Image (cartoon, coloured by chain):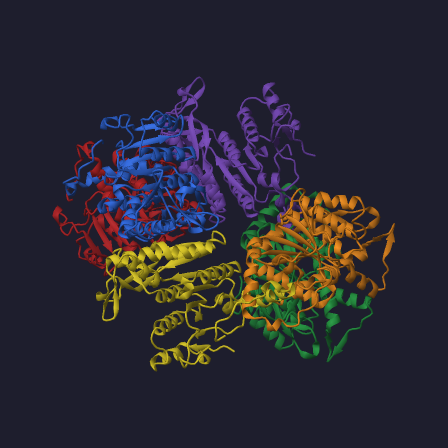
Chain colours: A purple, B green, C orange, D yellow, E blue, F red
Amino acid sequence: MDTPLTPDQNLDTFSPERRAAVLVETLPYIQRFRGSVIVVKFGGNAMVDDDLAARFAEDIVLMHSVGIRPVVVHGGAPQIGAMMDRLGLEAEFRDGLRVTDADTLDIARMVLVGKVNREIVASINVHGPLAVGLSGEDASLIQATALHPDLGFVGGVEAVNPAILDRVLAENLIPVVSTIGVDLSGQAYNINADTVAAALAGALAAERVMYLTDVDGLRSDVDDPGSRISRLDVDALEALIADGTVSGGMIPKAQACIDAVRAGVGSAHMVDGRLPHVLLLELFTNVGIGTMVLPAGVTLP
Amino acid sequence: MDTPLTPDQNLDTFSPERRAAVLVETLPYIQRFRGSVIVVKFGGNAMVDDDLAARFAEDIVLMHSVGIRPVVVHGGAPQIGAMMDRLGLEAEFRDGLRVTDADTLDIARMVLVGKVNREIVASINVHGPLAVGLSGEDASLIQATALHPDLGFVGGVEAVNPAILDRVLAENLIPVVSTIGVDLSGQAYNINADTVAAALAGALAAERVMYLTDVDGLRSDVDDPGSRISRLDVDALEALIADGTVSGGMIPKAQACIDAVRAGVGSAHMVDGRLPHVLLLELFTNVGIGTMVLPAGVTLP
Amino acid sequence: MDTPLTPDQNLDTFSPERRAAVLVETLPYIQRFRGSVIVVKFGGNAMVDDDLAARFAEDIVLMHSVGIRPVVVHGGAPQIGAMMDRLGLEAEFRDGLRVTDADTLDIARMVLVGKVNREIVASINVHGPLAVGLSGEDASLIQATALHPDLGFVGGVEAVNPAILDRVLAENLIPVVSTIGVDLSGQAYNINADTVAAALAGALAAERVMYLTDVDGLRSDVDDPGSRISRLDVDALEALIADGTVSGGMIPKAQACIDAVRAGVGSAHMVDGRLPHVLLLELFTNVGIGTMVLPAGVTLP
Amino acid sequence: MDTPLTPDQNLDTFSPERRAAVLVETLPYIQRFRGSVIVVKFGGNAMVDDDLAARFAEDIVLMHSVGIRPVVVHGGAPQIGAMMDRLGLEAEFRDGLRVTDADTLDIARMVLVGKVNREIVASINVHGPLAVGLSGEDASLIQATALHPDLGFVGGVEAVNPAILDRVLAENLIPVVSTIGVDLSGQAYNINADTVAAALAGALAAERVMYLTDVDGLRSDVDDPGSRISRLDVDALEALIADGTVSGGMIPKAQACIDAVRAGVGSAHMVDGRLPHVLLLELFTNVGIGTMVLPAGVTLP
Amino acid sequence: MDTPLTPDQNLDTFSPERRAAVLVETLPYIQRFRGSVIVVKFGGNAMVDDDLAARFAEDIVLMHSVGIRPVVVHGGAPQIGAMMDRLGLEAEFRDGLRVTDADTLDIARMVLVGKVNREIVASINVHGPLAVGLSGEDASLIQATALHPDLGFVGGVEAVNPAILDRVLAENLIPVVSTIGVDLSGQAYNINADTVAAALAGALAAERVMYLTDVDGLRSDVDDPGSRISRLDVDALEALIADGTVSGGMIPKAQACIDAVRAGVGSAHMVDGRLPHVLLLELFTNVGIGTMVLPAGVTLP
Amino acid sequence: MDTPLTPDQNLDTFSPERRAAVLVETLPYIQRFRGSVIVVKFGGNAMVDDDLAARFAEDIVLMHSVGIRPVVVHGGAPQIGAMMDRLGLEAEFRDGLRVTDADTLDIARMVLVGKVNREIVASINVHGPLAVGLSGEDASLIQATALHPDLGFVGGVEAVNPAILDRVLAENLIPVVSTIGVDLSGQAYNINADTVAAALAGALAAERVMYLTDVDGLRSDVDDPGSRISRLDVDALEALIADGTVSGGMIPKAQACIDAVRAGVGSAHMVDGRLPHVLLLELFTNVGIGTMVLPAGVTLP
């Protein structure tokens, strides 16, 4: 599973018996996840490749149609960057971190809520009136605070009020959440989507949180495709961060997995969003995909 | 589809992509039937072949797990006959029809409710606490009357009180119904299972009623396997009975299809119970299977 | 109360005032038991005497009509034996215990679920659509394990999943339970009905469990009809078993009473099923009947 | 049943079998009335004789405990008269009708709501927290208008808003209603209790309305105790009023029966409140009591 | 706020903007109390001055219309006294305390339930079908015991069963409670209304209990109108009772405030019932009114 | 009311009695609208003036807090134009109508959903977690079709599926709706907000729809401020359009009023959004504001 899967040339020649066999093999997985909340962080290439995005929508709708309750969380750095460019604005950095002033926040919010979120909702609703877009501001879903005074309106998650999500899920709808939060004064903040996914999964006591990334999982040797770590517990993952095995851009994602599991989520997964239907493969087959982070001390057979 | 399908030798070599593709192709079918009541008359070889019976149970559980609400109705003539033989009893006939005296009724009920029903419930419950056995006597589900005074305790359906089925379905359970009815005095009757399936489907406003038989469907020329009729409406089917095209043992089944559709069921189906997973193939693929009976004047593209 | 009561010759001469007086005297008993779950183990002569069985059905329906929620549990050893005889089968014994092989289990299940249970349901439903037959296999009500490898499919109660009973009771119906259990692999077992009654009563937090027997209660001197013990607590009853006062066939019944009360049931009763309307007499009058087993240390005035 | 019943000397000698027999004979009556609303107009001697009042309370509680939903309606002319006397007030009449001025209304309301209603509630609640006192003013239950300008605050029923009764009944409580109504301006009126009972029974679609009176029913010959009319329909009753057979004080009561039945109540009954437990005798035995008024054209076997 | 407010001469000249401004200023108060239970003890001059009583009714209805759930509790000593006088009865005293014999109790109950309660209900229901009168006897709301054998039927609160209040509140109605209690034998007692208000507020976990009195609040110097104590906690209030600052008729009211707050009520208030619309002023404006009693150690900014 | 109101200088000097008087005068209006759905089209100067926008949010929250269920609908032409300018894009016109190509639609959606909607939600949520932003795409709220092929993605309302609004209202939240619709293929369209407000009000069976405009209402003589029409029915309004009295930019708004009322809305209102708190003045006072459009033939006193 270390190289991207190639499309299958002759799906049309599938025999009916094979189709039935696949469905029957799926049965135990469907039964296992029925009724579970699964939070999916949508991002990376999957979000900017139209075909992968359509596959993603199919997966979410299929999860929903077999009784899973998916919650989609998304960011949109590339799309925000593109709009900044188009408006001729330059990102300002301080100590290597991007500063979000009022105008930048306004644009980020507009792009996230008004464009990226809408496109995800639309791609799901092609299959029926299923998705509802939400922002962290709606019904005070995500309460934020400034992460650092120098960074402007970049926020951290102060608290989650999942009531509106519970209601939307109870109505058998699929919430799609933009990661804008709000403080008590009504000021909005842009928040890292990995962090928000972990916080929402914890607040919803989700069975799983799944991060779509552009890598095939964590590796014990970053240069060796064969060194992917299939499963580890949060303690082991923290040790890998401490000893530098996990480094660079994977650190925030790994930390979000740790936070989610420590907050009570059943397991956290980093999976390769470049694989078409990666969610179905992970949830409904025994194909080993990505890296699974388990609670401390938990091992699976 | 006119010859029984052969098992597929190399399911294990299915690629993950193919599995995902099958699931995704199934999505529109799942969405279409979600929440629908589908009454399935279980019978024929499928009921006496252990392997086919296990496949049937898998199909019912899979239907249930994707949100369909299946209701199983069964008879059990072969099993009743076997017990009669074992007890050294001979069937009595009058004008070519089997007479059911009190002792025969007692044995029929015992075999249907105490053996056949139990085995179906058990085969489903291997997958979880899902099935509940019911007899038409429970909570006065099926009110019967004597079909003919000479035939003893052979009954017809006088009325259906589907309240107990509604309750069991509302609890997300799978009812398995033995076709014993009861009259107002408390006297039990054995009733033809095809008739009961049609009556229950009508009373439940079912989306479909499906009859598992030992043939591949109705044929316009009984000797020509290539003459299977895929689809027809009730008027056409009545004409086929009138002109003798449908004859012999297929008449009661065809009549039950007509009764069900006239009672408001969306469509009635005669499918080949000798095909493993025939329910999945019919419901979740576009493979043309058996014969579909539609309301008068309805045609499908 | 030590001899069976004789029928009353002149019920018809009851004056209206007397009738009203009886009803009014019943009021405190009705109020006391309103809403309570009462598990009744039906067995002994009452089950094989048609007249007593009809009286039993009346009692159950009357209990139900004044707001009690009765649950009927039954075995059927005599009826199973009769069918074994009719089929020319001989019971096999090992170390004095009857062995239940697959064929015997099949017959036992058929008789219990398909005949005895049906007859009880029918006798109740003469009064309205009230009773629903259940087997311990339905919705995994009774999880069983083999009692002893040498005995074949004779089971003990491993666990009770009372969800289906709760649902049936919530619908204001009367469950009638056959004592077939099932293990996780789907294998059925025949289980002692006294044991099942105690386990169900415990799982339902029943107010009472009542055993219909062919004796008038426990006696301190088995040969002295005047030595019936009206009331004792579980500790006292265990002492009576230990010192041999309770012996032979009464031991399992006494043990079931102890188990039920230790599992939280308000009280357990052994009453004389040969008395017509013994349930009404015990529940709705101050006539002292049978033996009442109370929690340790509890005494009544 | 034409002479008042005498108390039974030896109730204590009832055998247990007799008691059981009475209960079983009651079963069909209990099943018939289960869930029905029965409005009872309490009045006459029964209301001023402490022992009869206690019996009445027992009857109401017993009705309630077997699933009937009783509604008690009461007036209180004797008690109002006694308080008027005590206060040294004299009733004023105009054209033979008592005039109700503001002070009289105040006293009537005080006595009805604050004394008579309270005593009925208290006598029922001796058996448990069951009764709730209501006045027609509460939540605008009874909307009244002046019957005649000369009579002051004597009202007729303009409309009934049974919402508060529905709520109280839904909570399984027993409403006890004082017959004070209110007009849109908030002015209170004293209303005839027979009229109110008919109006409430109609608005509640009651199964029955029962009037406790001081006679044993309507007679075809007022002087012949043997001429009691057991049953008649509203047309026949209107004819009896027209031809003078029903006369004097019985006219308003007969008219209330007619109004109730014409408003959809199943039947209206005039019964002898001097008989202890007359409600139980009428509802739960086949003793012929009082006079039953049926819808036009309805006859019973 | 130390002198009664004078009516405003030119309300009609209010500009629309001023009206809007008042409403907007009220918003935070409405939001704060929305959904809260507030128990109001109605008494003093406000109860016997028709105009103040009408203002009180308006306040209660306005509280209700903005989502507060008010519960009104009332006594009626002056009205009882007036009826005693009218009947020529003299109050009997023992050791300075009024003795309530059976006749006095009867009259007290009649006046409270049949007159005072009715008048409050009527004044509220002028605005719609909102109020329902209750006595502590209804559905066993207030269980009482004799306060002292010498005092006859003067009761204390033994227990509160708030079920009927919960139901009435759940139906969005306004309960008006007369302070008659009842013991287990059904004997009624007259109970001090301040005490009942505190007990009900505690049992309902009310946000507030508010006492309408004829003074402007507690004073640190009873003769100095400027010494009103705006706020204090229960410990401070107990100290004021102990050192004699609170004395005479204010002691029972102060004690009721302490009891309510110790029973979990958010705060207790003594306000001047002689002020028109005093409830609105206290709840919806920042005008400082009366004395607020807070839980031990709680202070407000 | 023909000239804009001037702010009140001395609100702070309001006496408490005056405040109470205003609240009490508001009571009948609160009672009248309690529970009603009122759709408010937010637009014009009120949407781009920060202070007016804050007043608008206060009005919406106050409406909500007294039990009204407001639904806010908004457009945002000026904000879309500003973003177009900022991006250096020029609007294209065909036959005088603005053409919406894919890029323009993308920007319109981004601005409406991601900026304007967010700002309204934020301004309301300053008062608590009350508002939830929705787009017509969410759960297929607004089904659209192209208005004219030459205009690109400018849509008309094809159908409304108010389920998501019903849910949000049932949860006591305030929906804020952006007027983007979607066709069955998933293509989004920008729709005129006046039209959407009318369609939503009709689908919700709203009591009122209120349009905030920049004029003080319809005038019979557009140049005469004194010729404002306070009230007229839909037939009269259609006549005014036909005879040219209503002309220019007021026609679409007038047509929306007609459509809403013809679809079953109680009344439609054009009010001057430049007045602070115009919603409160219209709903809660008897100040005559704007123009009210009533169903055909309805007149008010």
Residue C102 point in image, percent of width and height: 80, 55
Residue E173 point in image, percent of width and height: 36, 49
Between A12 and A154, the residue placed more toward the observer is A154
Q: Is residue F180 left or right of residue A124?
A: left
Residue B188 point in image, percent of width and height: 67, 69
Q: Is residue B300 left or right of residue C42?
A: left
How many numbered marks have been drawn onto this rendered protein structure? 0
Between B21 and B39, the residue placed more toward the observer is B39
Image quadrant where one finds the C terminus of chain E: top left
Image quadrant where one finds the N terminus of chain E: top left
Relative to residue A148, is residue D194 depicted above or below? Answer: below
Relative to residue F175, is residue A193 depicted above or below? Answer: above
Using the rendered image of the protein, determine whether residue F73 is visible from the camera's viewpoint. no
Q: Residue at x 41, y 62 (%)?
A: D47
Rendered image quadrant of residue E227? top left
Residue F230 point in image, percent of width and height: 18, 51
Q: Residue at x 17, y 54 (%)?
A: F244
Between B129 and A287, the residue placed more toward the observer is B129
